[in-house]
Image (cartoon, helix red, strand yellow):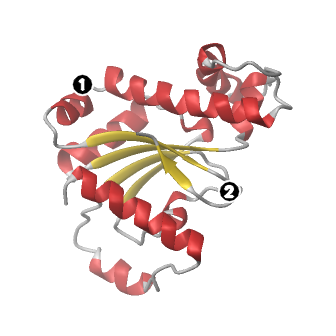
Amino acid sequence: MTPDEVIESLKSGNLRFREGKMKQHDYLAQKRASQKGQYPSAVILSCIDSRAPAEILLDAGIGETFNNRVAGNVQNEDILGSMEFACALAGAKVVVVMGHTSCGAVKGAIANAELGNLTGLLNKIKPAIAETVYEGERTADNYDFVDAVARTNIKMTLTGIRQQSPVLNKLEQDGKIKIVGAIYKLDGGEVEFFS
């Protein structure tokens, strides 16, 4: 599959999810089929939010996607290394950074929340607050602003991946992979891929 075909496949999976027409996954058969190797077509970086499980939202089964989950879908060296493995060694054709609406991590960053190691993670989201162009109330209680910051955070994560991973950047420049952003809308279930 080409990167564009993989993206279309993910979009089709999300449409099946939204319409309640998901594939009948035989997880035991998928487990058996993938025991000797894996050939996922995409690697996804998404938020840990329990309402946004990427595999389900995209109607993917065992062995179809690599999945990284961290609050606020921010990248770090470990995630970048995992993505490099997925694309350069295991053959994934697409990197998807998928945030979601009403993100608690984004809300926490806007509210300057502090709690142990979470403080450092939220600090990685804060640059997106400053970069977000928004005319209304810029508070954590305004979910339109939270969603605007979530979109900016996704775009900044995409930029960070390209800047901090020469491996992925070269694969994308050579046309072997695509690095794309998406946002999952909790209301309605659509995964909107950025153009």
Residue 122 in the image: x percent, y percent?
A: 67, 26
Query: Which mark identifies residue 50?
Result: 2
Residue 67 in the image: x percent, y percent?
A: 44, 53
124 lies left or right of 36: right
Picture quadrant of residue 127: top right
Q: Where, quadrant-wise, is the N terminus in this rendering?
A: bottom left
97 lies left or right of 183: left
Q: Look at the image and tell me whether residue 92 can be seen.
A: no
Query: Which mark identifies residue 84?
Result: none
Picture quadrant of residue 137: top right
What residue appears at the point 66 percent right and 50 percent down from the top-left corner? 49
Q: Is residue 29 above or below residue 151?
A: below
Give the residue type that dot 1 points to. Answer: Pro
Q: Secondary structure at mark 2?
A: loop
Q: Look at the image and tell me whether residue 150 can be seen.
A: yes
What residue appears at the point 36 percent right and 50 percent down from the top-left corner? 43
Residue 183 in the image: x percent, y percent?
A: 55, 45
Q: Nearer the viewer, residue 134 or 90?
A: 134
Give the residue type that dot 2 points to. Answer: Ser
Q: Secondary structure at mark 1?
A: helix
Residue corresponding to mark 1 = 166
Contact? badges 2 and 1 (CB < 8 Å):
no
Q: Where, quadrant-wise, is the C terminus in this rendering?
A: top left
Q: Is residue 24 above or below residue 111?
A: below
- How far apart in space, not on screen, are marks 2 and 1 (Cα)? 32 Å
Q: Earlier in the sequence, mark 2 or mark 1?
A: 2
For the view shown, which residue lies furthest in the front direction?
135
Picture quadrant of residue 147: top right
Q: Nearer the viewer, residue 29 or 111?
A: 111
For the view shown, which residue lies furthest in the right direction?
141
Neighbor class of circle 2 (other Cα within 10 Å; few <14, some 14-19, many 20+) is: few
What residue appears at the point 53 percent right and 54 percent down from the top-left corner? 191
